[in-house]
Image (spheres, rainbow, N blue to C red):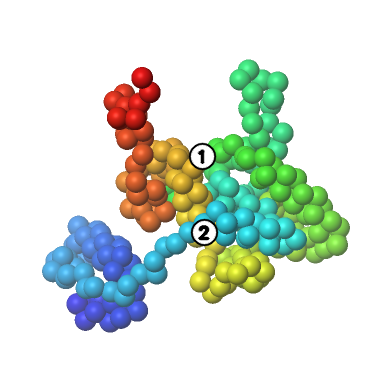
Amino acid sequence: MDRWLAAKARVLSTETLRKIHSVLKRSIARAQARDKVKRNVVMLCEIPKGKTGRPSKSLTLTQAEAVLNAAESANLYAYIVLSLLIGARTEELRALTWPHVDLEGTPDANPPTPPSIMVWRSVRAGGDTKTERSRRTLALPRRCVEALQRHREHQVTSKQKAGELWQENDLVFASKHGTELDAANVRRALRLILKRTDLNPDEWTPRELRHSFVSLMSDAGVAVEDIARLVGHKGTVVTEKVYRKQLRPVLLEGAEAMDLIFPGENREA
């Protein structure tokens, strides 16, 4: 087992090795409880240091605007807009269906309900979201509503062109025949869009649009607790661990409040 893990360490990151070690340990523990094995040998193995993981990064506001502008004429424009403006996971958007999209809201209700999407499914096995907290309903910014309205109209045209080849799955983001997109489809589409900008297409992935959402929200002064709820995290621990480079490093609220409570020498008389 030590030799096997050492071999994997040459091609996998330390975090991936830690997850593999955990899965093996729990699997053998189950076998041990059923007298299938005498002892859990994984308990004797240390987790080797693997390859350095790919550092996460996010778009600046200027870069994000450039990507949105470059995506205007692309089939997945609405996909890019939603990724950047609401921070949904790529696996959640690929499973999104029209019945879970409300582009009208109920403005006459008390209180009014804004347009929203129900992030209740993903392309994971069984269709479940990554965690229970990931199942959430998000209000849609105006630009998202406009992009989805345009996307829906474009999809009607795509259905007519496909004719009998169209497979109705109610998917918001589908192939030209109505089937579910896979991760490779989205990566290729994003790279084509990035080629129209100054960014290197080979250096960016769809998940980094979600990282960019976190960064832009943090730069706008949104509290990490609110960001955690928006991206579907149970608490702030995961948000701060996974997206620590995207969160504003300097907390300003305390200093700003104390400047009001205890003004400095330049305070007005």
Residue that numbered label 2 is attached to: 59
Q: Position of residue 45 (x, y in %)?
A: 16, 70
Please, what is the three-letter code of the amino acid marked with disc 1? Arg
Distance between mark 1 and mark 2 Cα atoms? 25 Å
- Answer yes or no: is residue 92 visible: no
Location of the N terminus (image quadrant): bottom left
**172 vs 82, nearest the viewer:** 82
**Image position of 23 (left or right of 168):** left
**Image position of 9 (left or right of 183):** left
| Picture disc at residue 136 | 1
| Label 1 Cα crowd, 10 Å radius (few <14 / some 14-19 / many 20+) | some
Q: Position of residue 36 (x, y in %)?
A: 21, 66
**236 vs 37, nearest the viewer:** 236
**Image position of 136 (left or right of 6):** right
Please report the residue visible at 67 percent of the width from the left and 44 percent of the height from the top: 143
Please report the residue visible at 56 percent of the width from the left and 73 percent of the height from the top: 200
| Picture disc at residue 64 | none
Q: Quadrant of residue 263?
A: top left
- Answer yes or no: is residue 61 visible: yes
Q: Is 86 located above or below residue 260 in the figure?
A: below
Q: Is 114 located above or below residue 238 in the figure?
A: above
Location of the C terminus (image quadrant): top left
| Label 2 Cα crowd, 10 Å radius (few <14 / some 14-19 / many 20+) | many
**81 vs 128, nearest the viewer:** 81
Q: Position of residue 150 (x, y in %)?
A: 77, 49
Q: Quadrant of residue 116?
A: top right
